[in-house]
Amino acid sequence: MDFKKIQIIFLAIFVMIDVFLFMMFHQNTSLQSENVNQGSNSEIIKQMQNDQINFKLNLTDKKSTGYYLSATLNNNLKRDSKHLKNQKFSYNNNILRSTFKRPYGIYYSNPEELLNKLIKQKNFISNGSDYEYSSSLSTNNTIVYLQKAEDRHIYSGTRGQIKFDISDDHTLTGYTQSYLDNVKILREKSDVISNKSALVGLYQYNEIPNNSKINWIHLYYTRLLSIKDNQVLIPTWVISFNSDNSSTSTIKRINAYTGAILDGSGTTKSARDSVNNN
């Protein structure tokens, strides 16, 4: 295939993405207007409490803002791995998996305090300054760091994060890392719905069972669509809850522009007119 044909293909892809984003942007206003007619958020919050849906969250009607972002997956982690010390590693599908030859002892009650220092060292991890600790996603045996983008964090499966492995005897044994490169703003900053509206919307979609506990809700950048190694990211309310005393947490995502549910691949799961009248 000659270079001109390649240019035409990439141009067509760009145009399709641009048109798609344009439609999503203008759909935002009408969908948010519909939400006003579905009853006040405060009344619905009371209904949730009557259904034994418990939460201790700082819910607010305050709206925030966000961007459409683009990012790419490449092999820079593999290239930069030559600078890493005290590690043996493998690289596959844009993910670096590393094991420390001499594990680090972590005897702090807050292991992120040590990791916050180590992560800035280039011979410890690549691009470490582009990540921040996530207390919500971390456990006793896995410490999670999320990549930063435009004053927020990226939450995109295994992409754009580091997972540190902590053994039962309090040693740091290794990690997995993925990095999203060339993060760029695609469109101007726009308003997003509030965290209260996101939680209410998820409830109205019948996605939160009775007798559930809401653990947390955060505004992240998550993947909307992918074209090969290129990704489009949008502001997304990510909500974690446990249902009926289950030890397993469920993660749900709400498009922070439109209020629509996003499935695991980033696509819209159902339309607003499927909401029942709770």
Image: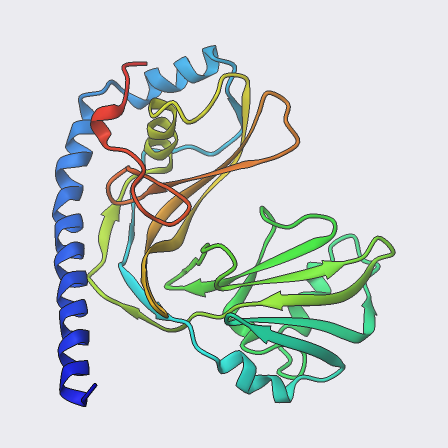
Residue drawn at (73%, 54%), measured in percent from left and top?
110
Q: Residue at x 54, y 86 (%)?
A: 79
Residue 117, given in percent of the width and then of the height, sits at 67, 71
Q: Residue furthest front?
A: 1
Residue in front for this viewpoint, 185 or 11: 11
Give above or below for 243 relative to 100. above
Q: Position of residue 7 (x, y in %)?
A: 16, 82
Q: Is residue 171 left or right of residue 25?
A: right
Point out the residue furthest to the top here.
50
Q: How many marks?
A: 0
Question: Can you say which quadrant of the picture contains the C terminus?
Answer: top left
**Most foreground residue, 69 or 99:** 99
238 versus 98 height, above or below: above
Across and down, in percent, residue 211 comes to 54, 17
Taking 89 as reference, is 21 left or right?
left
* x 56%, y 72%: residue: 92
Q: Is residue 20 left or right of residue 207?
A: left
In what quadrant of the picture does the N terminus appear?
A: bottom left
Q: How did the renderer colour the structure?
A: rainbow
Image quarter for residue 164?
A: bottom right
For residue 254, which quarter of the picture? top left
In this rendering, the answer to whether 68 lies above or below 198 is below
Across and down, in percent, residue 101 comes to 81, 77
